[in-house]
Amino acid sequence: MIELRPFADLGGENHGWLNAKHHFSFANYYDPARMHWGNLRVWNDDIIAPHTGFPPHPHRDMEIITYVREGAISHEDSLGNKGRTVAGDVQVMSAGTGIAHSEYNREDEETRIFQIWILPTRTGDAPSWGTKPFPKGERSGRFVTLASGYEGDGDALPIRTNARVVGATLKAGESAEYALGADRKGYLVPASGEVEIEGVRARARDGIAISDVETLRITALADSEIVLVDAA
C-alpha cells in the first residue's frame, strides 16, 4: 500500500510565530484515522519565525528527532545541554524518564524543521540529547541512516526504538532503493522537490504512508531532498 497524504490536506494552525502542519493528530488537530503509523506518532512540519521559539517545556517516554530543513534551531535543556543544529543536520532527544527543553530560532530568517516523534521500545532510561551534521553531498544518490535504534548503523544518532530515520538527496531523474521489508511501515516526506514511488507522485512536504512493500524504489522528478522513517 502506498497512500499519498497531500500537504494541503494536513491539519495544523498558524500561531503567527509558528506555522505548524501535522501529518498525524497533534495539539488541536484530531483525526482518528491519523493517530500514528506503526510506532511513528508525530511528524510536524514547522516554520518558526525569526527570534521566536518554544519556551521550556517537559517531555518523557518519547524519541524526538528534529530535521532542520532551513535556518537553524538552538536547543537548551535541563541536563545542561546546549547546541545549534543547522539546515541538513539532525538532533535527537531521548526524553526517557523526563527532560525539559527549549527550542528557539535565534536566526534573522525563518527556520523550517520536521519534528518527528517515535514511541520508545523501552522506558525507564535517563534522558539524553545529541546533534550531528549529515552533509547533503554524502547522501547524494543514496539513503544514509540519520538516527537508528539498531546496532551497526554506523554514525547514526542513537534512538531507543525499533526504527530508523534515513535521508537522501536525488537529482532529477535519479532513483534510489531502500529495503523496507513487508512487515514494516514507512513514512516518506520530500523536504524539497518531487518524487514518484510506484506511480504515486509526491511534491515537497506531501506525506506518503507505505506498508506491505519489500523494497522501495524512489525516483526524483526534480532535484529532491527526502526524509523517510522506517517504523515497526
Image (cartoon, helix red, strand yellow):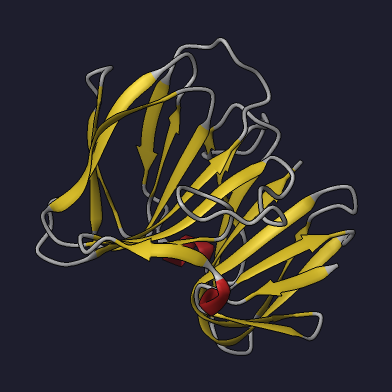
- Residue 101 place in picture, x, y as percent: 28, 30
Q: Nearer the viewer, residue 1 or 149?
A: 1
Is residue 183 placed above or below 122 in the rendered structure?
A: below
- Residue 202 place in picture, x, y as percent: 62, 80
Q: Nearer the viewer, residue 1 or 225?
A: 1
**21 left or right of 209 in image:** left
Say which residue appears at 53% left-offset and 40% top-offset: 156
Is residue 80 placed above or below 145 in the rendered structure?
A: above
Say which residue appears at 72% left-offset and 56% top-offset: 33
- Residue 144 place in picture, x, y as percent: 58, 54
Say which residue appears at 38% left-offset and 28% top-offset: 129
**33 left or right of 29 in image:** right
Q: Nearer the viewer, residue 186 or 173?
A: 186
Occupied quadrant, residue 171: bottom right
Is residue 138 placed above or below 57 in the rendered structure?
A: below
Is residue 87 placed above or below 2 in the rendered structure?
A: above
- Residue 153 place in picture, x, y as percent: 63, 38
**72 left or right of 50 in image:** right
Q: Quadrant of the C terminus?
A: top right
Q: Quadrant of the N terminus?
A: bottom right
**3 left or right of 14 in image:** right
Say which residue appears at 63% left-offset and 64% top-offset: 188
Q: How many marks?
A: 0
